[in-house]
Image: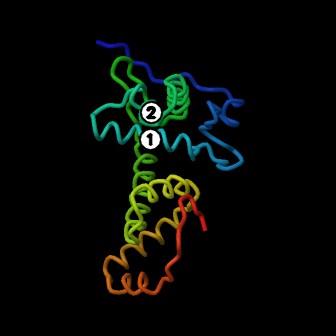
Amino acid sequence: MPHQRSLASNRAGPSVMAGLHLDGGTVFNRIVMPSRSEPSQTAEDYLERIQELIEEKGYARVVDIASTLKVRQASVTSMVQKLGEAGYLKYEKYRGLILTDQGRVVARRIQNRHATLSRFFSLFDLDAETQRADIEGIEHYLSPATVEMLDDLARFFEKHPAILRQFQQGRSPRPRKPNDLS
């Protein structure tokens, strides 16, 4: 039977919780997110990807996370340790990562937020790459109330396609240049 170890058993001291940094990533940033219960943007990205891998393959390994997030395996290992210490996941040696209930709640919240934004932007015929870049750029900065409002607005337009067409027809055409943010 493989050796099982929970990273949560190796609790970090208070100085670590002030802001766990790792190659530019932070698990908890007390300035942005003062509560230990709220993961940083980087931690959210990891949790989301771990959940996606588990759903796709049945497991999540450091090598797969590193490959899909385009980061070094050492960076993933370090973040995985921090997430384990924070109670979001457990590591089973030779078997991979398992999200705790707390980790699954956060991952699903992130996936739902991402799906809502994707659904919303899809209504406006934005190309897939623009949607991806925009969602990645804003998803961590939106409050739950704003995401809920965008979900309601998407549902409204889906229920009333004539109003959506009217909105789209009423927009003035704007010439766009590549990478034009205006």
Which residue is labeled 2 in the image? Answer: 89
**x and y percentages locating residue 61 in the rendered image:** 38, 27
Asked which quadrant contains residue 156, the reply is bottom left
Query: How dense is the environment of label 1, judged by Cα within 10 Å: few (below 14), some, or many (20 and up)?
Result: many
Q: How many marks?
A: 2
Write the residue at 43% across / 26% down.
62
Indicate which disc, 1 or 2, sits on the residue closer to the N terminus.
2
Query: Is 3 rendered above or below residue 40?
Result: above
Query: Is 88 rendered above or below residue 154?
Result: above
Relative placement, left or right, of 112 versus 36 is left
Alpha carbon distance from label 1 to label 2: 6 Å
Secondary structure type for disc 1: helix
Which residue is labeled 1 in the image? Answer: 103
Relative placement, left or right, of 74 versus 13 is left
Which amino acid does the dot numbered 2 rest on? Leu
Which amino acid does the dot numbered 1 rest on? Gly
Q: In which quadrant is the N terminus drawn?
A: top left
Q: In which quadrant is the C terminus drawn?
A: bottom right
**x and y percentages locating residue 92 in the rendered image:** 38, 22
**x and y percentages locating residue 45 in the rendered image:** 49, 43
Discs 1, 2 touching: Cβ within 8 Å: yes
Relative placement, left or right, of 181 versus 132 is right
Write the residue at 33% across / 22% down.
95
Query: Is 1 rendered above or below residue 71?
Result: above
Rendering colour mode: rainbow
Residue 30: assigned label: none
Of residues 120 and 47, which is closer to you in this image?
120
Secondary structure type for disc 2: strand
**x and y percentages locating residue 24 in the rendered image:** 64, 35
Write the residue at 42% across / 81% down.
168
